[in-house]
Image (cartoon, grey):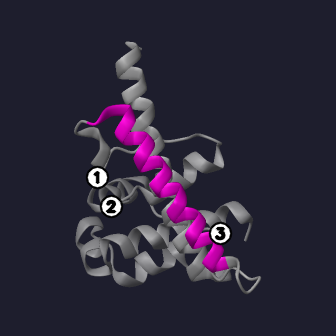
Amino acid sequence: MDSIGSYLKKHTEALVKDVGLEAACELTGKSKATLGRYYSDSDEHVDRFMPVDAVAALEKAARYPHVTGALAELRGITMSYDADRKNTEGGGVNADVIALSQRFAMLMGEYQQSIEDGVITINEAKRLLRETLALQHVLIDMKLHLEAESGS
């Protein structure tokens, strides 16, 4: 399987797990076996991918648009995701700068813990990814506040 197909299948699996298998079955009208085939990396399912309407239904219920995010990353596109926007309720840029430094410190702490033994495990990489995404969200909030202040 090519790296793009493998990458999309991993994000499809993350999407299904985010929503929950039972809920994903209900939302898409697909069986557990069918959903499993969409993210299976076995040779017999290498060319099976989740239909776009099923992805849309699941991403509406998910905490994060995993497949859409993966597609954007593959094209070098940065998405602006607007969920759980803690910094948007006031405080403005000053609050964003504080949040940015806190999130960066958390990322560096995770990195320090992860690299201590010289190997970053899958779970450590997932924690680093979560912190990176949280940092990205703070940066997006900051960008929005700066645009609002500058009238752009």
Looking at the rendered structure, which numbered label has been put on residue 6?
3
Pick the front one: 34 or 103: 103
Residue drawn at x 70%, y 82% as measured from the top left = 116
Q: Residue 98 magenta-drawn? A: yes
Is the residue marked by circle 1 packed among few (<14), some (14-19), or many (20+) residues within 10 Å?
few
Q: CA distance from mark 2 to mark 1?
A: 9 Å
Considering only order in the chain, which callout, 3 or 2, is on the residue closer to the N terminus?
3
Q: x, y percentage for residue 4?
A: 68, 60
Q: Amino acid at mark 1?
A: Asp
Is the residue marked by circle 3 packed among few (<14), some (14-19), or many (20+) residues within 10 Å?
some
Q: Which residue is mark 1?
A: 84
Q: Nearer the viewer, mark 3 or mark 1?
A: 1
Q: Residue 85 magenta-drawn? A: no
Q: Is residue 2 left or right of residue 47?
A: right
Image vertical order of residue 130 relative to residue 91, above or below? below
Quadrant of the snapshot with the C terminus:
top left
Q: Which residue is mark 2?
A: 63
Residue drawn at x 68%, y 81% as measured from the top left = 43
Q: x, y percentage for residue 57?
A: 30, 57
Q: Is residue 18 visible?
A: yes
Query: Which segment is the magenta one?
Result: 91-114
- Kind of element beneath mark 1: loop
